[in-house]
Image (tube, rainbow, N blue to C red):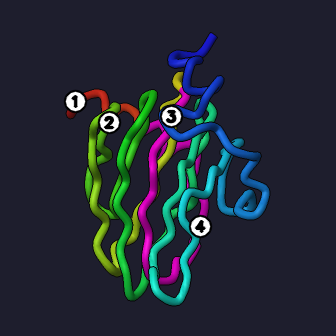
Amino acid sequence: MAKNEDVKQNGGLFGLGAKNDAYAKYFTGQSYLNGLVSPEKEVNVGVGNVTFEPGCRNNWHIHHDGYQILLVTGGEGLYQEAGKPAQLLHPGDVVVTHDGVKHWHGATPDSWFAHVAITTGTPEWLEPVSDEEFATAFKQGKENA
């Protein structure tokens, strides 16, 4: 049984949402998306609650002409910028990814994970995070916690 099963049941504070089929090709494993704010002409920001099953992570990606803020709401996750050690994430953690920074985020191998993503700009989706990279990131995250 995975840790933080309560996150699976309700997606944390903002609800599990539907299977994230629209972005499935950019994820390893199953994620769920509950869109909270859609970008529009007057408000150029997207806000969504993303829930990851254990071991699920998104591909490496870059936000161009914008940024991404992650507000961790449940479970245990990982965040890594290219060339830097991974960070272990817990509820209450905040991560700011600046324009042009290559990064990825997702659940640890043994826990559900949820965060609210506040995003502007255009994402460029890159290669998947390999199983080897993921295992190394998990080890680094635990060591640096």
Task: Nearest to the eye among marks 4 and 1: give it.
Answer: 1
Spatial separation of the CA atoms under disc 4 and disc 1:
27 Å
Q: Is residue 24 magenta?
A: no
Magenta stretch? 112-136
Can you identify the residue that label 2 sits on? 88
Looking at marks 1 and 2 on the same chain, the residue that comes earlier in the sequence is marked by: 2
Mark 1 neighbour class, 10 Å CA radius: few under 14, some 14 to 19, many 20 or more: few
Which residue does the numbered mark 1 point to in the structure image? 145
Q: Tell me which label, 4 or 1, sits earlier in the chain.
A: 4
Q: Which residue is mark 4?
A: 127
The three-letter code of the residue at mark 1 reads Ala
Alpha carbon distance from label 1 to label 3: 16 Å
* CB-based contact (under 8 Å), mark 1 and mark 2: yes
Position of residue 30 in the picture relative to residue 86 (left or right): right
Contact between labelled residues 4 and 3, with CB atoms less than 8 Å apart:
no
Whether residue 124 appears in magenta in the rendering, the answer is yes
Task: Name the residue that disc number 3 marks.
Answer: 113
**Of helix, strand and loop, which one carries label 4?**
loop
Q: CA distance from mark 2 to mark 3?
A: 11 Å
Q: Secondary structure at mark 1?
A: loop
Which one is in front in this view, the residue at disc 3 or the one at disc 4? 3
3 or 4: tag closer to the N-terminus = 3
Which residue corresponds to the image point at 29% horizontal and 53% vertical from the top-left? 95
Residue 18 in picture, x, y percent from top left: 75, 46
Between residue 113 and residue 87, name the one nearer to us.
113
Residue at the spot x=52%, y=89% of the render? 41
**Whether label 1 touches label 3, CB < 8 Å:** no
Whether residue 136 sits left or right of residue 98 in the image: it is right
